[in-house]
Image (cartoon, coloured by chain):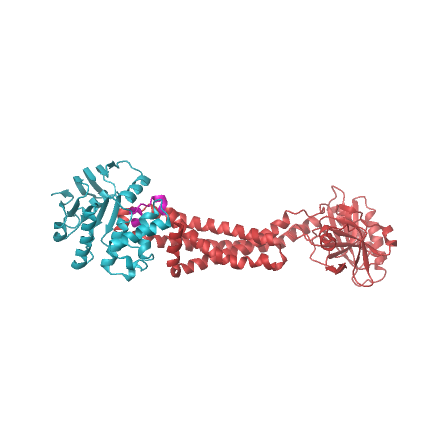
Amino acid sequence: MLRHLFKLIWNKKGSHSLLIIEIWASFMVLFGVLSLIVYNVSNYVQPIGFEYERVWNLQLSNNQDTVGVSDKMHRIVQQIKSNKEVESLSRMSSNSPFSANQMMNGVTYKKVSISPEFFYTDENFSKTLGLPVVAGKWFTESDRVSKFTPIVINSKLKEVLFANENPLGKVIKVDDKKSFKVVGLVDKFKSKGEFASDSPALFEMLSKDDTWSTNVLIKTKAGVDANFEAKLVKEVAATLPGWGIEVSYLTEQRKNRHNLTLVPVTIFLIVSGFLLTNVALGLFGILNLNIAKRKNEIGLRRAMGATESGVTTQFLGEIWVLAALSVLIGLLFAIQFPIIHVFDMKANIYITAIVIAIVLIFIIVTLCAWWPSRQASRIHPAIALHEE
Amino acid sequence: MIKLQNVEKVYRTSSIETLALNNINLDVKKGEFVSIMGPSGCGKSTLLNIMGLLDEPSKGSIEVGGIKVTNYRDKELARLRNEKLGFIFQSFHLINDLSVIDNVEIPLLYRDSTLKERRELARQALEQVGLSNRMKHFPKQLSGGQKQRVAIARAIVGKPDIILADEPTGNLDSAMGNEILTILQNLNEEGATIVMVTHDDAMAKRTHRLIRLFDGTQVL
């Protein structure tokens, strides 16, 4: 029967070509949207790697004040730390968690080069963000005496640079003048939020005279509210007159970051939903019309021995064959994405999207064809045979 | 071979009731070639549809090949139609998108058969009606007579006991009509039981028995 259906479809390829294009286009749209969704979901299910609850981000801007910035930063950190509401705090560069800023730089180890994200911070970073060190230790002030700048790396960077080697104690090069020594390893650090991928990260200890890293992450004690925020701003403003002060909560920044991902995905979903609904209605209409045109054939097949369910299956089978042809054409395009790693995404993301898109296409065409096919099977053979 | 007892067929709409067949009693014996005649609208096609299990009588019982089909379900009726009956229609009812041989194979698709078996049986059936040279053609490339011969090949491919022909020569000129009737006579001589609806007295005279209907009632 399958061969018969293929033959029937093939002999009517001219009239079916638009239908095939329509299903192919739907497949491609679904594949695109699903790749985006699968990518984001697969990132989302991976742990973020750190704690952001009760962590505030104090962003300071020295504006025109260029005198003794590092001393002033050191002083303000000590001052904030002295508040009983503060559990822990850490200075860091402007690419704080959930911010839009990025700082990339190249590093090399045994001819393997990569550009991880650099986070400049101090010895309290791990404690403030609850970022567990899985091997070695987080750098401390005592590490400054070392010949090389102490760094902590994440597992992703370790995989690329060291593969199965133990990274601890290894020296990696930035340029001819600067090299790092790995003192610790953390697992994941998805600083751009749950929807971001776990990308290579490197934590470098702030130099004593650093003037650029003016962000302070403050982990507050439980129950601390906005009163402390007001007090903190007042205190900082009094100590650093003329400086810009902005306090944001990491929980809020995380939400904003999520929206940056969720809003476009939702828009894509709505647009593709409309598109697929139109395609589904079009398919439904075409199939209905097709069946009305083929009443004689239905009557004939019933007379020749087809059952009601046989007629339903035949019409469903025809649309499945059409869908299979369309999907095959679509696969020629879609399969290029995992092969050539388009957008640097993992192959399994595209493969998953392809599989889901195929399943959805078959569900859509089956739903669209079911009712007209069922109607076709219920046409009385004697009536169908006498309709011209 | 086909036995109808007290068969009645009433078509009902919300406002009107039409008696299409009234108390039909009929017994078609094995190997008979029976023709049904009557004016338009007298119920000839309805009777043929009931004999072919394409329609259900409002009253009465039907036996096909010794099997009483009252209360038969769709699946069982379909199997009987496939195995015991072959149909020929006035307007041929060939599927234009399929080649001649694929059209002939259709009844075999609804029973257990391999592609090779189907091809062989279809080829034999087409040879029987003299169309083995047109197997790969499409219906649009054939004349009316050739189309009807394809329809006959399709009717006989499954080797049914009974052939039901609804005005098989109605759309053909007399020469083609004669040719088709000769094929049907040959099939009858080879053992097929044939019931044919016709308007043509000359055709009817060439059959074994004539049944005449008038206003849904059997008058002969």
From the image, give the main secondary structure of the stretch colored magenta: helix
Residue at the extreme right of the image, as rendered: A145
**Drawn colour of chain A?**
red
Q: Is residue A299 visible?
A: yes
Lateral position of residue A370 relative to residue B103, left or right: right
The answer to if B206 sits in the magenta stretch is no
For residue A90, side relative to residue A304 (left or right):
right
Q: Is residue A154 left or right of residue B110?
A: right
x and y percent of residue A346 in the render?
62, 54
Picture residue at 27% right of the left edge, 54% below the top: B126
Q: Residue at x 43, y 49 (%)?
A: A366
* Residue A255 rendering spot, x and y as whole percentages: 65, 50
Q: Position of residue A62 (x, y in %)?
A: 79, 60
Asked if one can make out residue A387 in the rendered structure from this viewpoint, the answer is: no
| Front-most of residues A332 and B217 | A332
Nearer-the-camera pick, A270 or A304: A304
**Which image quadrant is residue A307 in?**
top left
Front-lying residue, B160 or A258: B160
Q: How many marks?
A: 0
Residue span colored magenta: A297-311
Which chain is represented by cyan in the image?
A: B
Screen quadrant of the C terminus of chain A? bottom left
The front one of B190 and B21 is B190
Is A201 placed above or below A127 here? below
Quadrant assignment, res A111: bottom right
Residue B179 picture location, percent across and down: 18, 56
Q: Is residue A302 magenta?
A: yes
